[in-house]
Amino acid sequence: MTTRIDTRFAELRKQDRSAFVTFLMAGDPDPVTSLAIIKALPKAGADIIEIGMPFTDPMADGRVIQAAGLRALKAGMTLTKTLQMIRDFRKDDDSTPIVLMGYYNPIYIYGVEKFLDDAKAAGIDGLIVVDLPPEEDSELCIPAMKAGLNFIRLATPTTDDKRLPAVLANTSGFVYYVSITGITGSAAANSAAVGEAVGRIKRHTSLPVCVGFGIRTPDAARGIAERSDGAVVGSALVDVLSGSLDAEGKATAETVNAVAGLAASLAEGVRSAKAGEKVCRDFRRTPL
């Protein structure tokens, strides 16, 4: 089975560049604005879109994304409405890969079998569930794979070579490397250290390795893209979204454009990394 994620990375390999992966919380700051932002992301240069499932206890997330989840919940966002938002997105876009990211509790309450059926029907391509370790693959990972969804696992700076094979065993789509030891938005990624970590992971898998956490600027995105198969940006986009809201936390006329504008500049950073490398390689092959 080939998913949209597999297809997108095959296209990117032909273009000799890394992926730009965006993260936003479903329903932030409200369902209508959230859908408008997500629809704007592919035009802004997003290759893959991660969408957070709002949850009251997001243990891996920092202040910025925690606040986004609370705004979404306050606006009435639910997992059912999140899936409907994806259905609405798919009316106009059937090619951009969509990954749901979050925690197991909402899925468990929804019902695993029903969730997987509904997610697949809605147009979801993959799942990142941060609080389900490999030892619990029978809970969701294996059923998701059987349902035709990629199950994307996190690797971290503390995932050593002994642990890595277990992490990669049932991973598909891509590997998400967390570049820092900490929560989202808590530190900046070190591109040199990331390069070493990505190289180590690639000795264990042929899957693309995307890097997230700590990427906030086009320069940082370019640095990560030079050393990985994709740069994932979440907190910076959510921060810009938050900054565009009015005093009551409501969307303004600037909200969609503010997020899309930053996404476009970050996408340019990612694209310039691989474009620069290709120029250098072509130069070295050119006879003098």
Image: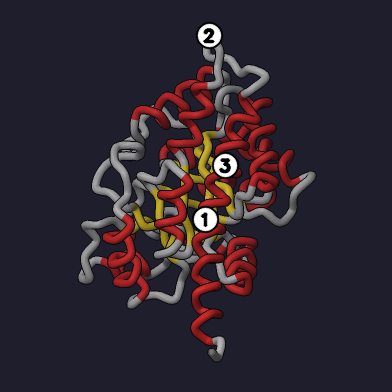
Query: N-terminal of the two: label 3 or label 1?
Result: 3
Provide residue 52's location: percent of width, then percent of height: 50, 39
Count residues near mark 2 (Cα–Cα under 10 Å), then give few for <14, some for 14-19, many for 20+: few
Which residue is nearer to you in this view: 186 or 205?
186
Nearest to the eye among marks 2 and 3: give it: 3
Q: Is residue 125 left or right of residue 131?
A: right
Residue 1 in sight from this viewpoint: no
The Cα atoms of the two marked residues, 3 and 1, are separated by 11 Å
Q: Residue at x 46, y 71 (%)?
A: 207
The Cα atoms of the two marked residues, 2 and 3, are separated by 25 Å
Which residue is nearer to you in this view: 176 or 117?
176
**Amino acid at dot 3:** Ala
Tell me the residue that label 2 is attached to: 248
Which numbered circle lies on residue 263? 3
Provide residue 79's location: percent of width, then percent of height: 56, 34
**Amino acid at dot 2:** Glu
Which residue is nearer to you in this view: 169 or 288?
288
Q: Residue at x 57, y 51 (%)?
A: 268
On screen, residue 279 above or below 67: below
**Amino acid at dot 1:** Val
Which residue is nearer to you in this view: 286 or 53?
286
Q: Quadrant of residue 56?
A: top left
Nearest to the eye among marks 2 and 1: give it: 1
